[in-house]
Every structure is written in structure tokens, then in C-alpha cells.
Amino acid sequence: GSLTAHLIGFLGPIPASQEDELRAQGFIPNRDKIGYSGVEASLQDILAGRNGLRVVQVDVAGQEIRNLEPPIAPAPGNNVYLTIDTRLQAAAEATILEEIRFWNTYFGTVRISSGVIIAMNPKTGEILAMVSYPNYENNRLSRIIPAYYYEQLSQDPRKPLLNNAISAEYPPGSTFKLSTATGAINEGVIDLDTIVQTPGQLLLCERFNPNDICTDANTRPFVDYIFDQNPAGFGSLRFLQCIAYSSNVCFYKLGGGFEDEIPQGLGVERLRQYARALGYDEASGIQLLGEQDGLIPDPDWKRINTGENWSTGDTYIASVGQGYVLSTPLQVLLSGSVIANNGVLIQPTVVRQVTDGDGNVVPYWFNPEDFEVTTFETPGSYQISPFTTNTKWDVTVDPLIQGYSCDGPYCTLTEDLKIIQPESIQAVRAGTRLAVTDSNFGTLHDLFVDFPIAVAGKTGTAEYCDDVARAANRCAFGAWPTHSWTLAYAPYDDPEIIVVAFAYNGGEGASVAGPMVARVIKAYFEIKAADLASGAGGITP
């Protein structure tokens, strides 16, 4: 059915282009099927089993005389057990359907056309729920693939066959500020006591080269999201408040610098380093086909792809997760998990274990480079059965960040490598908690202030102008539509769940995606409590 369609996927006939290859492996074209999507495709080699074969001599009566070749016994396929908790998956699916239905009814039009909810255990990497909307009924494709239904799915502009959790790239908006904040505090751009002035807008001299002269022609405003309600902005903020209030002006300054107040911001080269350390700019290696890398741009990328030089304004916009910055919802989730997990990034997985036909657990390793599954470890592979927690890296131990050297206004990365200090991660963690506890402007305060378990997180509202928005004439300057994001984890002191929600064209993060995250976290702890009461031991074995 639809509940796990994007995860399990579906089977289809062997394509003509693969007939020779698969026939050599014992498949029978025009009879056997192979995986087309989901784990049915990515783990095809261990799910399919093997056909038996006998070549025999018979007499005129059709009676067998002897084997002409050694017979090959058939072998059943293995069983793959997923990390998904179907109760939490059902709760997440109901949440996204109800929230999208509510807001589309409220606005009187199909405003939100797609969305994602992912829940993960940040300590183990187990994906507990992954819902991509719109979805499809994979049971309708179980025996044959009806042409009319496949055409309906493939021609739908919302792309229901696409797993938006891993295959769609969007600007992450203010959820990306976790990367900027981590870099700024670790590089000494700001400390916990620094006061940053955050008026409602900045007038920036847009420099494409360090020695450019400022004129009216290259001066432009950069506004904070609070500007329409309060043109004076937030006023004087410290680092933790910048995160909790999600002040754009503060992060513009941290990312790109501003006059004498912050003479040298983080800069795009260093920003890219910290974003990559938090899981952006490359596929995670999860066992699902179609995962995208996202994009953290740099000056070379802009020159190659647009023919223009990088400007200070580009750094400002990138620092708040917009402009050319793109990510998948899974990458946003992983960035938050690094903060929640005190600097450790765990390999996300949808596989708990693999068993053979007799129920015995079979050891397997998965290589995300070529999607090869083997019974032994290979370079670049990680173990998926029996279940193993695989650490990708610990930013407080593994030196992932390049050094930075400046000669006057010109700065470059060096070959030296360093870690992210544990104190830097803890500072950003504290900012995500303040987003809940601060009653003034904490972006998650209203959602979680009365929640019985301590929650921390980050909201995001990302402007965009894609082909869909252009076709709807919605890309007026200064009035772009916005995607809705929210990321949260709990309990704060010892996280066992982290959830991200995304709503395409959803508007404010705290208004649309925020309630989705709150409902899923609440469902998680309700399921856990019910399991413990019944002696089942909790949602995650």
C-alpha cells in the first residue's frame, strides 16, 4: 500500500537492456521481475533468490534418463527487516495528510503540493519513519504494472513516484543556520558574550571584489523576517538568541561580516567546510536509490555555472540557507543530528537485519558508491546486517575543517585540518534549546513550551523561485513564496528521536512544518510509553 511505498518500492519486468546480464545470473526474462525502486531495487541482489536449473536427457516416452549437467538447486531470497516502526510511520503519514489538507482548505487552493516527514534515532541512525507526499499504491504494481496507472503517476506534476525525502532538493532556509552558527562560534567570529545589533534591515555594499567602491548602484537592502511586524528588528542579541530567534540580520553579519562590527565574517569557503561537516553537499549513503547530493556553492561554482563573480550578498544569502544552497530533507535531518548527538554523525539506515530462508541472520555489508551488497567488508562499505551503528565521523575528534589564512582582504583555505571544538557544538545545542524556552521570540516556544519532555530544534522558512512558481507567476521581486521547515529532537539532554518536516510552499516554518514535527514527537513518546507498559521494551529494539 501507500504507507511504505517509497521505502519498499515495487517490482517490474526485466528491461531489454538488462536481459543478457541477468540471464547470465540465472534470471528468466519475460517471467522474472526485478526491483524498480526502494529497497526492492537497492537490495535486489539479496532479495531475489536464485532459480533452479536441470538439463536432462529423456527417452521417446519423456522419461528422464540422466542429468546432462550438474543440477542447480533453487535458493530462496533473503528477508530484509526494516528499521521503520509502522505505527510511527502511520502517525507521520496521517500527520502530513491532515496538515496539508487543512492548509489547502484554509487557503482555498492547492497551495502545499508536496511534503516530507522523517524521524530518526540520532544515536543509531535508524530511520523510524520516512513519509514522502504525494505517494502511490505500490500494491497496485505487485503483479503487473498497469499502463494507465503508471502513466497517471509519471505524468503527475507533483511526481508521486519520487521519494522527496532523499531525491528532491530545496533551499533549507533557516535550518541551515546551524551550519553558519557552528562555523562562526568555532572560528571566533563571535563568542557567547558578543552583542550583535540586529535592525530590521541592513544596507549592504555589494562587493564582487574586495576593493570595489560602494555606490548607490551596488548598495542593496537585506531584511530580517521580522521587518514587516517590527522595522526596528530584534535589537541587541547574543549568539544563543541569534539561533533561538533565527535573526537573519545576525546571520548575515556572521556569514559575510559587516563594517567594523564584524570585520571578517565566516566567508563562503569556511561556511562550506562546516556545512559539509554537518552532512550537507553529499549523499548520505542510505540504502535507497535516487539520493541527491544537494549543493553548497562556492565562488568557482558560481563562475562556472553563471559566469559571474561571487559577491558579499551571495555569502549573506547562503548563510541563511537560501540563494544557490540546496539540500534534501534527509540532509537537514542529519545536520540537526550532529548537533543533537554532540558532534557525531551516524550513518542513516533503513535496514535492521537480513535473514535467510531459515530465519538465520546473515552478515551483509553495503557499499553506497555502487550499491553493491556483499557478505564481507569492502573499501567504503558499512555493515547493515546484523544491525550495527556505523559512525561516519565525529566532528569533535576527526579533523574535517581546513584552516584559513588571510593576507589583507584576501583569504584562502590552507591544507591544515582541525576539529570543531566540543564547546562550539554545545553552544549551538544551547541555542536550539533556547528556541523552545525563550518566551520572547523563541521560534519553537509556542509549540513545545508545555511539552512534558525537553525538546530543542530549529525552524526554517525558505524563499524560492522554481519552475512551478514561475509558471504560477509567483516570483515577484521581494514577494517570493516560501517553503516551511522545522527540525526538532528530544529529550534534549539525551536525544533518542529527531524529526524533520518539510512543506512545499507551506509558508512559515513554525506555523506549518512545526506542528507536524510536534505531532510526530508526541506520537513517538506515546508509542514508547505504551510499549513499556505492555512489556514490549520501547519503540526501538
Image: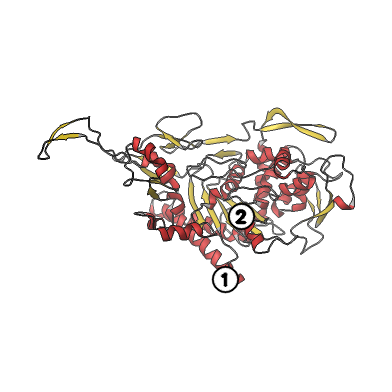
Residue 521, given in percent of the width and then of the height, sits at 53, 55
The residue wearing badge 2 is 486
Type of the residue with mark 1: Thr
* Residue density around tag 1, few if under 14, some if 14–19, many if 20 or more, within 10 Å: few
Task: Give how far across and how far down residue 312 sits, in percent.
Answer: 79, 45
Can you see residue 508?
Answer: no
In the image, taking residue 13 as reference, residue 193 lies left or right, namely right
Res 442 visible: yes
At a point 77% along the width and 63% down the height, the residue shown is 228
Q: Residue furthest top?
A: 415
CA gap between label 1 and label 2 equals: 22 Å
**The disc labelled 2 sits on which kind of residue?**
Thr
Quarter-of-image position of residue 305 = top right
| Left or right position of 194 against 474 | right
Quadrant in the picture for the C terminus:
top left
Tell whether 354 sits left or right of 484. left
Q: How is the image coloured?
A: secondary structure
Q: Nearer the viewer, mark 1 or mark 2?
A: 1
Q: Circle 1 is placed at which residue position? A: 105
